[in-house]
Image (cartoon, grey):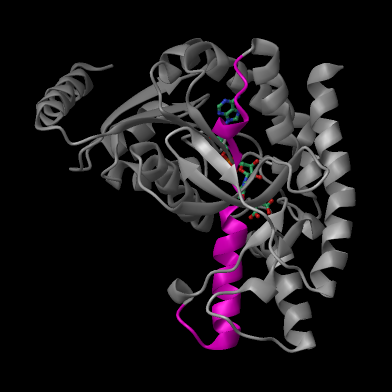
């Protein structure tokens, strides 16, 4: 660090020590891929989160600049930057929560699975670091294809002997955020009042909104159901096409990621009744991983909640989702096992 950064950091540490005496609880959070399109706004939002006392920003490029910038915000969290693989271990030691938005995003015409080739290896390396440096941390995995990267992470942790299914969560919150927004538009409600469970996975037909379970209770016409299901399943592609080659959702994703990370931290703190959808190890279907509502607690995803009653439309959607999911999960598992 240049001297002024060192001084800021030590001033930050003094503040953190003072606060520690005052007993405000804070968690240590690392973002891997912190200089990216998601990483930067995510770092900004985590710096504002009062539950975060220490924020580590890791990337293979540009973290010094992002860290210097974010560290000037007059909020509580102490920010430290880490650049490149040799600093990965240091970035991870002592972390309670690790959020991973590292990896390449889609361009128009690509599926999320087209990202597997590059992102699978990135996720493997980062998870090896987690297994070594903070095996007890909760992991929020954002890198696509989530339906395969979560099984990859699980296999890496199994190999290292650190796997705890409760602590590995694939982030599907953006599907819920989109579903709430689009359903609220159709119903003429404030999206903050709407809750749509979205289950399955995070790609195309594996994204299964349960419109029969929307809160507040409501009903839709068959054309509304077709429109909403398709819009929610293709929300990512809608953004990829609008960005026309400049990447995929970053701002709404940073918002969604913070919503989910905050729920994980409140769970870790011991708050009761924290329920969010996530892609986790699951016995809700015959597949080893599935996204559904989970109850978050002191040890992560403490309970995977049942799907609840599905109508005929949703049962048909579930069958389609399971077929694609089975292949994506297997692809992730074999990447590590081969
Ligand atoms: P981006 O290219 O803007 O940023 C990715 C960052 O990852 C870059 O800063 C890059 O340097 C970094 N990176 C690359 N290799 C790395 C490594 N080995 N270690 C650490 N960092 C590394 O991309 P983005 O728009 O931020 O998207 C990131 C990922 O998130 C993509 O895979 C995208 O598909 C996915 N995504 C997922 C969701 C979801 O709902 N789960 C939503 C949006 C995007
Ligand atoms: C999304 O849903 O926006 C992300 O998975 C990014 C993408 O490729 O669509």
The x and y percentages for residue 99 are 50, 35
| Residue 300 as seen in the image, left or right of residue 54 | right
- The magenta stretch is 162-190
Which quarter of the image is occupied by the N terminus? top left
Let me know if residue 257 appears in the view.
Answer: yes
> Is 147 or 105 nearer to us in this picture?
147
The x and y percentages for residue 41 are 42, 47
The x and y percentages for residue 294 are 57, 48
Main SS of the magenta part reads: helix
The stretch drawn in magenta includes residue 58:
no
Q: Residue at x 81, y 59 (%)?
A: 205
Relative height, residue 13 to residue 71 (above, below): above
The x and y percentages for residue 208 are 74, 62
| Residue 336 as seen in the image, left or right of residue 144 | right
**Picture quadrant of ligand 1:** top right
| Residue 3 as seen in the image, left or right of residue 120 | left
Q: Residue at x 72, y 67 (%)?
A: 309
| Residue 257 as seen in the image, left or right of residue 171 | left
Which quarter of the image is occupied by the C terminus? top right
> Is 100 or 136 nearer to us in this picture?
136
Let me know if residue 41 appears in the view.
Answer: no
Relative height, residue 252 to residue 161 (above, below): below
Q: Residue at x 55, y 70 (%)?
A: 180
Relative height, residue 117 to residue 242 (above, below): above
Q: Residue at x 58, y 57 (%)?
A: 174
> Is 276 or 146 nearer to us in this picture?
276
> Is 24 or 102 nearer to us in this picture?
24
The stretch drawn in magenta includes residue 171:
yes
């Amino acid at each position: 660090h240049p001297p002024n950064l060192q001084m800021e950091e030590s001033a930050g540490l003094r503040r953190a020590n003072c606060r520690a005496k005052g007993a405000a609880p804070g968690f240590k959070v690392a973002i891997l891929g912190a200089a990216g399109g998601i990483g930067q706004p995510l770092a900004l939002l985590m710096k504002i989160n009062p539950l975060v006392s220490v924020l580590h920003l890791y990337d293979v490029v540009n973290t010094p600049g992002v860290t210097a910038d974010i560290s000037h915000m007059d909020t509580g969290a102490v920010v430290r930057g880490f650049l490149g693989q040799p600093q990965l271990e240091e970035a991870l030691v002592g972390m309670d929560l690790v959020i991973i938005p590292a990896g390449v995003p889609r361009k128009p015409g690509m599926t999320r699975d087209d990202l597997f080739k590059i992102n699978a290896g990135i996720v493997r390396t980062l998870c090896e670091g987690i297994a070594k440096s903070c095996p007890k941390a909760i992991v929020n995995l954002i890198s696509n294809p989530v339906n395969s990267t979560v099984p990859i992470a699980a296999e890496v942790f199994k190999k290292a002997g650190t796997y705890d299914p409760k602590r590995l969560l694939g982030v599907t919150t953006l599907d819920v955020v989109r579903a709430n927004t689009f359903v609220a538009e159709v119903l003429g409600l404030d999206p903050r009042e709407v809750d749509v469970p979205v289950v399955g996975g995070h790609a195309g037909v594996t994204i299964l909104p349960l419109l029969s379970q929307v809160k507040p209770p409501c009903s839709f016409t068959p054309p509304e159901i077709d429109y909403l299901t398709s819009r929610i399943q293709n929300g990512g592609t809608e953004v990829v096409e609008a960005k026309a080659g400049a990447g995929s959702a970053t701002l709404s994703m940073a918002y969604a990621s913070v919503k989910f990370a905050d729920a994980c931290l409140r769970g870790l703190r011991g708050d009761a009744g924290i329920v969010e959808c996530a892609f986790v190890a699951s016995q809700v279907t015959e597949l080893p991983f599935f996204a559904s509502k989970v109850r978050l607690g002191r040890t992560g995803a403490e309970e995977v909640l049942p799907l609840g009653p599905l109508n005929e439309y949703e049962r048909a959607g579930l069958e389609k989702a399971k077929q694609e999911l089975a292949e994506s999960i297997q692809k992730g598992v074999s990447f590590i096992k081969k």
